[in-house]
Every structure is written in C-alpha cells, then in structure tokens.
Amino acid sequence: MFLEIDQLSKSFGGLQALDRVSFQVQMGAIQALIGPNGAGKTTCFNLISGVLPPSAGSIRLLGREISGLPPHQIARLGLARTFQNIQLFGGMTVLENVLVGQHIHLHGNLLATLLNLPAIRRQERRSIAYVRELLDFVGLADKESWSADSLAYGEQRRLEIARALALQPRLLLLDEPAAGMNPRETEDLMALIASIQERDITVLLIEHDMNLVMNISKSIVVFDQGRVIAQGPPRAIRQNPQVIEAYLGKEEDADDV
Amino acid sequence: MTEYFLHIAIISALHIILALSLNLIIGYCGQVSLGHAAFYGLGAYTSALAAIHWQASFFLTLPLAGVVAALFGLGLGIPTLRLRDDYLAIVTLGFGIIVDLILLNLEVTGGPDGLVRIPPPQLAGVDFRNKFMYLLLVALVVAFTLGLIYRLVHSRHGRALKAIRDHEMTARVMGINAAAYKISIFTLAAGLAGLAGALYAHYITFINPESFGLHTSILVLTMVVLGGMGSILGSVVGAGVLTILPELFRRFADYQDLAYGAMLIALLIWRPQGLLGTGKISQKFSLAKNRAKKGN
C-alpha cells in the first residue's frame, strides 16, 4: 500500500483531535478527506507531513514508518503539501518561491556554492528552467518576477501548488485548494489536479467543495469529531446515512429547532 | 589629518564586517542576536593572546580568532536556536554580558586593564603600522566577507535562509533543515565577527573589555537596522554612517547610546525596512505586521 494510516491519534491537552484513525491511499489515486470543520482533517495532514508529532499510531509511506520524523526528512521521502491558510514566502518572488521547492534536489556544499563552481551554476540553470515549466503548468509563467504576496488569491493558491510540485513529490497533500475560489477558478483547479495525477503523483486532498470532491476523487474518507466514519467511492459516500447525519444533523435535531 | 581619515576608514571597515555578519543572522535568517560584540571580543582576545604568549604570526592568529569565535557561536547556537525569537534575544543578550564579565575578571585577559603591546602584523617587510597598509589589509577581509555573503545569499542556501525567515515551518515542510541552517549561519557570523576582532586588536594594539560590551552590540544592531535588514549594501552604508556621524558630533559623545536607542525606535516605527531594505524583508520585525496578526 502506498500510504497507510493506522490507529493514528492526536490529543491537544484534553482535546482528542484525532481518535484512532485508519485509512489507506492507493498509489496514483486522487483521494479526498471530507467532514465538518474541526473534524480533524487538517490535524491529520499535519501529522502526515511531520508538522506535529502524533500521540499514537503509525503512518507508513511506501512501507516506511514516517510518524514522528521531522518535516524536512518526510519531504525528502517524497511528500509535499499546501496549506489551508496560504503560506507563501512573502519576501520572495514567485520564481524564488518555487525554487525553494527544488531545494532537496539541488546539491553542492557551502564551499562549492561559495566558489560558484560551474557544476553549481549548471544545476541552478536547470532548476530555473524546470521551475519555469512548472509556473507555465499552473499558469503563472508571466508573473515569475512578481513578489509572491502581490498575487491575487487564486494565483497564490496555484503558486503554492507549483511550489509543492517543485519537490517532485510522490504524494501531494492539498489542504482546501478551492477555498475562496470562484466557480471558474475551481473549474481550472479541477483540471490542474487531474493533470497532476497524470504526472504520477498521488493526491490526497481536503476539500469542502462537494462538486469538486465527487467529480475527481476515486475514493473518499469521511471524518467526524476526530474519527473516520466512512470511506469508499463517491457514490457510496453520497448515500451513506452516517455521512448525511454528520453533515445535516439528525432529523429529531431538526425538529427541535 | 590624513592619518585621521585613514583611522576612520579602518574603523568603518571593521564595522562593515560586523554589520554584514550580524545582518546574516537578523536580515537573512530572521533570528535576533543582541550579543554580537561578544564574538568580536572573543576574536580580539584570542588573536592578541596568541600573539603575546606564543609570538604567533598575525596571519595565523587571524584565522585562529575566526575559528575560536565560530566555535563559541556553534556552542551557543546548538542549544539556543531552537528557542523562539524573543527568548533567543534574551539568551544572546545574556551571553554578551557573560563574555564581558569573564573578560573583565580573568587574569589572563588582564581584567579591566585589558591587554597592551599587541604586536602589529608583520609580513615580508611590509610595515602595517602604516595606516594605509593596514587599511588595505582590512579592505581585503571586507572584500572576502562581501564576496562570501554575496555568493551565499544568491544561492540555494540563501533562498533556504529567506524561506526560514519568512515561514520557518513551511520551509521545513519544503525539505529544509531549518535548525542546521540556523546553527551554521550563527557559527559563520560569529567567525566573521572574530576576524574583525583580531583586525581591531592588532590595529589598536591595546584592548580592554569596554570595546566589546553591550554598547557595541547595540551599535552594530543599529547599523544593520539603519542600513536595512537583509540588504548587503545597507549594512555597508549603515556601518559607514554610524561610524562617521559620531565623529562629527564628538561633543555629544555622552548621549550616543541615547541617540542609537532613539534612532532604532524611530526606524522601527517609520522606516522598518531601513535606508536600503526592500520593504518586505523586515516584516517579521515590523509593528504593522504584529498589529495585523492580532487582528486575525
């Protein structure tokens, strides 16, 4: 299995944010995590990417245990992610932001860099060419010298995706990529995610836009109050009574109001 | 009169090395250090002691001073660079005070009297007591520092540093080992300050702890902020201006610290990016951003 989450738990003091969560992701798939706000989806992403250490449980990427590793090591194993609240390097240009994503693929120690050896210069040129391709791929080619925080909202989201792709990851975590986008931007985003999959990158995404989720994911995992309450293909999830209850509440509740 | 101008030029050049190295820590890595003068002092004393006790050549004691100061930087950096910014400021402040106290109280450092009769550098019959020759020597080290920092910040390492400064956790998620970078930069900056210290000691030929205390740390910090955090040229200009201005206002020497403090506050309020900063670079330290944060 490509990614295996097993009995994963995380508590913040007395709050159980994730409670023995287990699910799997198949290689090459687009899989979605859905659920009400506060259900633990982003916490799950934070544990997988090493931003937070888990309280218990295991995360295996291609059979290798990664839970508890620092984020920079997990990145080197082929994982990249974006953030719900966009986190670009605001003091850097669009091109530089994406170049940061290439960091793990660039070599050369401090001395070689300081001497600016030809190999370093060649590598840098190759890297810039590759990054320009990525910017073209996400539709930001003409804005490479702009400062990252001067971009429009939807563009910032796409820049974050380009930066994550520059890591050349095997697994890409997208945290609410369509948040704040208008329907046209969401449409473009869907096409973008589909073409990311064509690059042999497995995509795991958190998303509230059900149209997007139902259209592009092969499989959906539903979170509620820190637990996984359902998983399966979109059609099954749509009709699952527990999922409907989590989203819409019970009928009796509705009567009380 | 020429002698006097040469003297000012030499001191400016030393300040440029100090400001550039501190700028690496503050402007490029986003970490606060309030004890930079301690590394300057460690370099000065290391080189002076080696020259006095072992009659070692300046061209050996200079790199030695850099290495010793760098080792102290490494020793301080490893445990402290995991701390949040405000704690780091306190720890580096404390370190500066401790080094100052040790220099004041050890016998080998000559206590408050310091060290005297530090030999000027000697090399193949060149007389470095000639201020012009000494200025050339210092200029060489300035050029070395400038080249090193320029290359560094315009490489993938420089991008990694700026990423750490802008968003440390995001940088780590991008595969950047933030702790290793911060420690390396702190060590490098300490080493450069150590070189400046050695150059100072063998120029003045007489040193005491007074030159390496909090006053100097704040002075260098002011140079960096005035010139612009994260701007190489800014550090050069900041160091130049704050070396020359006090000379013009000699009569008000007693009020220097007051003036630096006032200048720092005024800059952070009205021009946080400094004279030559690009504006976005010092958001981390600007009041406006903190206000925005609270608004969220």
Image (spheres, coloured by chain):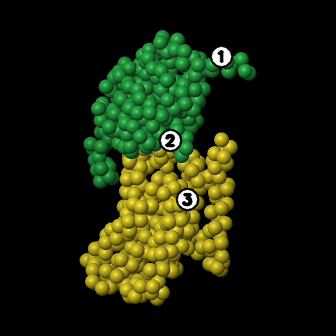
Chain colours: A green, B yellow
**In the image, is residue A115 above or below residue B5?**
above
**In the image, is residue A203 above or below residue B101?**
above
Type of amino acid at the residue the image marks with label 1: Glu
Residue B194 as seen in the image, left or right of residue B91: left
Residue B173 is marked as none
Location of residue A98 by image quarter: top left
Q: Is the same chain shared between marks 3 and 1?
A: no
Residue that appears at 62% across and 74% down: B256
What's the CA distance linking mark 2 and mark 3?
Answer: 27 Å
Q: Residues within 10 Å of mark 2 (few under 14, many from 20)?
A: some
Residue at the disc numbered 2 = A11
Residue B61 as seen in the image, left or right of residue B288: left
- Chain ID of residue with mark 2: A
**Viewer-side residue, B193 vs B213:** B213
- Chain ID of residue with mark 1: A
What's the CA distance linking mark 1 and mark 2?
Answer: 31 Å
Dots 1, 2 in contact, CB < 8 A: no
Q: Quadrant of the C terminus of chain B?
A: top right
**In the image, is residue A68 above or below residue B179?**
above
Q: Residues within 10 Å of mark 1 (few under 14, many from 20)?
A: few
Foreground mark, 1 or 2, reads 1
Q: Residues within 10 Å of mark 3 (few under 14, many from 20)?
A: few
Residue that appears at 48% across and 26% down: A228
Residue at the disc numbered 1 = A251
Type of amino acid at the residue the image marks with label 3: Asp
Residue B195 in sight:
no
